[in-house]
Amino acid sequence: MKLFVGLGNPGKEYEQTRHNIGFFVIDELAKRWNVSLKTAKFRGLFGTASVFGEKVALCKPLTYMNLSGECVCPLIDFYDIAVDDVIIIYDDLDLPPGKIRLRLKGGSGGHNGVKSIIHHLGTEQFKRIRIGIGRPTNGQPVADYVLSRFTEEEKPAVMEAVLRAADACEQAVTTPFIQVMNDFNE
């Protein structure tokens, strides 16, 4: 089973924020694959489907960003999912809005949700799709910036990035991730 996890924060007040871009991708995949995301005992919204003949699972942790590993790791353990079959999708301050970057492994890059997953999994060896949200340019604290909404000017590029990230996830169902990286990294 392939597990796609989009990071974000639960609650109406966070729905359209930069930090929730991972949730945007999971919502897009759920729509494409007709997956119903239901609350699971793993403190997240979770659903499964068969896509291109492969079993896939989608997850949106409801633990708040900084505790994402508390949802992801029990889910991986319960369903006996290989870490190599996990793809984490999240926002990245170091990429401009609308850019995506896929990686086979790596550190957290300062992202607290990824730090939590690394801590709970005990490894950095998981795939990820990073979606650019840019950095604040007006002196706004980073914590406030990631919880802000995209500007009208940013929205078209961001929504295009969400669709491209979902396309990359679809390709990753049946294609080696290194090939997906070659096809989607900008």
Image (spheres, rainbow, N blue to C red):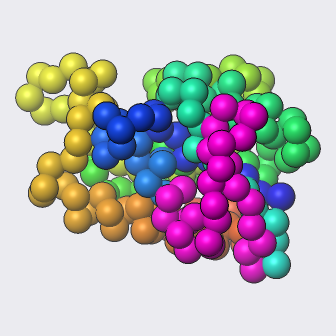
Write the residue at 41% across / 61% down. 162
- Expressed as whole percent of the image width and height from the top left, the position of residue 100 reads 42, 56
For the question of whether residue 98 can be seen, the reply is yes
Judging depth in this view, the residue of 37 and 23 nearest the camera is 37
Write the residue at 35% across / 56% down. 99
Q: Quadrant of residue 72?
A: top right
- Expressed as whole percent of the image width and height from the top left, the position of residue 81 reads 85, 47
Residue 120 is one of the magenta-drawn residues: no
Q: Quadrant of residue 138?
A: top left
- Expressed as whole percent of the image width and height from the top left, the position of residue 45 reads 62, 44
Q: Residue furthest left?
A: 138
Q: Quadrant of the N terminus?
A: bottom right
> For this view, does 69 lie left or right of residue 83?
left
Q: Is residue 120 above or below residue 38?
A: above
Q: Residue furthest bottom?
A: 52
| Number of dots carrying numbers | 0
Q: Is residue 46 above or below residue 31?
A: above
Residue stretch in magenta: 26-52
For the question of whether residue 108 can be seen, the reply is no
- Expressed as whole percent of the image width and height from the top left, the position of residue 109 reads 48, 29
Q: Quadrant of the C terminus?
A: bottom left
Write the residue at 66% across / 32% down. 43
Q: Is residue 46 above or below residue 1?
A: above
Q: Quadrant of residue 11?
A: top left
